[in-house]
Amino acid sequence: QKEVEQDPGPLSVPEGAIVSLNCTYSNSAFQYFMWYRQYSRKGPELLMYTYSSGNKEDGRFTAQVDKSSKYISLFIRDSQPSDSATYLCAMTWGAQKLVFGQGTRLTINP
Amino acid sequence: DTEVTQTPKHLVMGMTNKKSLKCEQHMGHRAMYWYKQKAKKPPELMFVYSYEKLSINESVPSRFSPECPNSSLLNLHLHALQPEDSALYLCASSQTPGLAVNNEQFFGPGTRLTVL
């Protein structure tokens, strides 16, 4: 079993829809949770960074962490074609090594 | 300036060549990282430098040799690579070694390496 599980997709939704991306994990020591967006042939761009449980909102993006269920989510409201990318969850217990999910390929159709 | 830069953007090399990848950041970050990313896979950590000293080597073959000349620069020296080493090589940096709140890793755009 992988430490972090993420459905690779692909996921295709119409423009304006609410997108829900999720990761589950098995290591209860994880405390820091990140979502990265990666466009094709580019480096990952940090979208959201959260510590422990709870919600964090930044514009159209909301990150949720449920440590009791070992489950994290990223919601994208009013999705745009420019949101089409691969979304990677990543997490760590506080060391320098990030553990990544497989990434979900998302396409927003105009 | 919240940017990590990497050069070159693309590199094609033969198995007998010696080449170097370069990474630079001017954010005052004291931790720098090399990752390798294959197509449709997540980044894999290779090396971590903390305060210009190598702190993590993820059992990377010796044909990859990292170097941190100063707090802003990180190099990856390549020698006698194999075709399976072809990948996107990503550099990242974070404020201080070890993670605490607001100590996230920022990635550069990567160098796309092809080994013939």
Image (spheres, coloured by chain):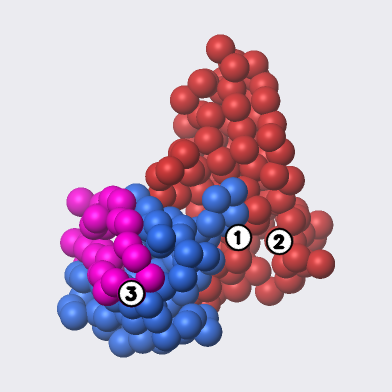
Chain colours: A red, B blue
Q: Secondary structure at mark 3?
A: loop
Query: Is disc 2 in contact with disc 1, using a CB cutoff of under 8 Å?
Result: yes
Q: Is residue B15 magenta?
A: yes
What chain is tagged by disc 3?
B
Query: In the drawing, does residue A89 fall left or right of residue B18?
Result: right
Query: Is disc 3 in contact with disc 2, using a CB cutoff of under 8 Å?
Result: no
Residue at 45% over, 49% down: A44
Comparing labels 3 and 2, the label whose residue is closer to the camera: 3
Residue extending furthest toward the top:
A110
The quadrant in which residue B62 appears is: bottom left
Residue B106 appears anywhere in the view: no
Q: Secondary structure at mark 1?
A: strand
User: Against B94, is A11 above or below?
Assistant: above
Amino acid type for the residue under numbered disc 1: Phe
Q: Is residue A30 magenta?
A: no
Residue A13 percent location from the top left of the image: 67, 22
Q: Which residue is mark 2?
A: A4
Q: Secondary structure at mark 2?
A: strand
Please rate how many residues cluster around mark 2, counting C-alpha atoms within 10 Å: few if below 14, some from 14 to 19, many from 20. Answer: some
Amino acid type for the residue under numbered disc 3: Thr
User: Against B64, is A65 above or below?
Assistant: above
Query: In the drawing, does residue A61 fall left or right of residue A23?
Result: left
Please rate how many residues cluster around mark 1, counting C-alpha atoms within 10 Å: few if below 14, some from 14 to 19, many from 20. Answer: many
Q: Earlier in the sequence, mark 2 or mark 1?
A: 2
Q: Which residues are magenta?
A: B1-30
Residue A10 percent location from the top left of the image: 69, 35
Query: Which numbered circle lies on residue B16?
Result: 3
